[in-house]
Image (spheres, rainbow, N blue to C red):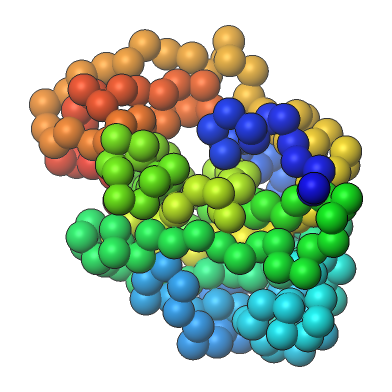
Amino acid sequence: MHHKLDILADKGYVVLGDFGGSPISPAEWEQLEYLDWKSGGDTNFAPLASATGEMDCRGFWDHGKADKYGIWTANRAIAPSLATYVENIGGNYGRVRVIKLNPSDEATALRQLHLDDNNRLNPDGTGWVVRSWLELDDTPGESVFILREDKSDPATETRIPLHPGMQVVIDTERMWHVVWHPGPMPRYALITSWETDKVIESWIKREMVPAARTARPARKLAGTVLSANTVLSASTVLSASTVLSASTRGSG
């Protein structure tokens, strides 16, 4: 058995407060070396940490390792603030990558719903590996994370509208997931694999937004029905009956 975080037991994800550090220059993700690696759509990935320190997007298991103890690649020199963000969290990270996601329509995105293979070769008795996202550049209010407990059942779906600076932690080996991003420009996000332990638990608790500061009543706006759950903040989840206008319709 692996050690898992109670905070992820209920929903399989947690939305944190926005990144509160110093602004990060877009050059840190725009000038990285990207590899043509497809996962969750028309994507390219820039490895910041890999299994060996080489520019490699493959799973750590290809090198006989669990997705832990990542080694920085040459991209670290181009993105020092992103590397510092990871190091300041203090946990045991594995793959650290920036994703470049090109635009798509909703139907195309939904066909890309997938689970991640985070825990292959992860020894019993150690921490379960989950992933965090730091949104870098997207279409605020339109790019959206789509999560499902059951890939084929929309009733199990949650949609999380995204914006730059947003932080999310997801058990992506449990939750089917994809981002629907309508564009027009590519979306960028920092994705990090973490071994769940007391360090990561403490970071999550520090970064969570108190409910009293984020709670707001659900609003109904004319438009298109979204999903079983639409997350508007760390504490607000709207039901399947909630409708949003075409201008704020989720995408990812």
Q: Position of residue 187 (x, y in %)?
A: 43, 63
Is residue 165 something that shows in the picture?
no
For the residue pair 126 and 188, the one nearer the viewer reads as 126
Residue 178, relative to residue 161: is it above or below? below
Quadrant of residue 101 in the image? bottom left
Residue 143, relative to residue 45: is it above or below? above
For the point 39% across and 46% down, the residue is 150
For the point 58% across and 55% down, the residue is 173
For the residue pair 119 and 45, the one nearer the viewer reads as 119
For the point 50% across and 64% down, the residue is 188
- Left or right: where 181 falls relative to 213: left
Instruction: Pick the quarter of the image with the C terminus.
Output: bottom left
Quadrant of residue 191 in the image? bottom right
Q: Position of residue 132 (x, y in %)?
A: 64, 51
For the residue pair 245 and 106, the one nearer the viewer reads as 106
- Left or right: where 116 falls relative to 137: right
Residue 90, relative to residue 233: is it above or below? below
Quadrant of residue 75 in the image? bottom right
Is residue 135 something that shows in the picture?
yes
For the residue pair 77 and 70, the one nearer the viewer reads as 70
